[in-house]
Amino acid sequence: MATVPNVDNKRYQGLIISIALFLSLIGALLAFTFYTSNLLERNTALIDQTNQVANSAQAVIKDLFDLDSSYGEDTNSPHIQRVLSRLEQNTALITSSIAAIEQGSTITDAEGNSYDLPKIDSQAQTNIAAANEQ
């Protein structure tokens, strides 16, 4: 008796290859999604940190105008002392934030979450050095 070749395997071979390609495409899309989510989280932390620098700079400018309008007021008054303490806090925050952005270190937000800032490129470091000189 002659053996009949198994034709069923060839009939479903195209379907099996199609399903395997579909699953590999889904896996590639899932890996790409994880990668872009991680990249987006790192960039969001960097954007938040630069916004914090901008907000602190605005607060420093506001306090400087406040001090200018309070010219002649007693330096020991509660108003002047509060403005001076805010100035110290905001300038320290600006300095530490710029250092963290420049070095790409780990920062902690108000809720206690830690984020690793990405290391910035040499062109951006040149811009930061120019901003620090001003």
Image: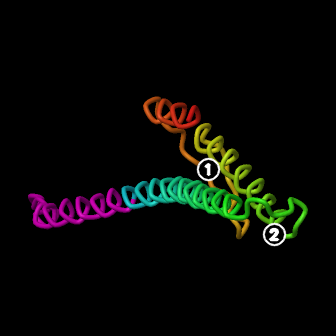
Q: Which mark is residue 116?
A: 1
Query: Residue 69 falls in which quadrant of the image?
Result: bottom right
Residue 112 falls left or right of residue 132: right
- Please name the predominant secondary structure of the magenta segment in the image: helix
**Picture quarter with the N terminus:** bottom left
Q: How many marks?
A: 2
Residue 75 falls left or right of residue 25: right
Q: What residue is drawn where x is 45% and y is 53%?
A: 39
Q: Position of residue 18 (x, y in %)?
A: 18, 63
Q: Nearer the viewer, residue 106 or 95?
A: 95
Q: What residue is drawn where x is 9% and y is 58%?
A: 2
Q: Which mark is residue 79?
A: 2
Residue 105 falls left or right of residue 35: right
- C-alpha distance separating marks 2 and 1: 38 Å
Of helix, strand and loop, which one carries label 2? helix
**Picture quarter with the C terminus:** top right
Q: Position of residue 12 (x, y in %)?
A: 15, 67
Q: Nearer the viewer, residue 122 or 81?
A: 81
The range drawn in magenta is 1-30
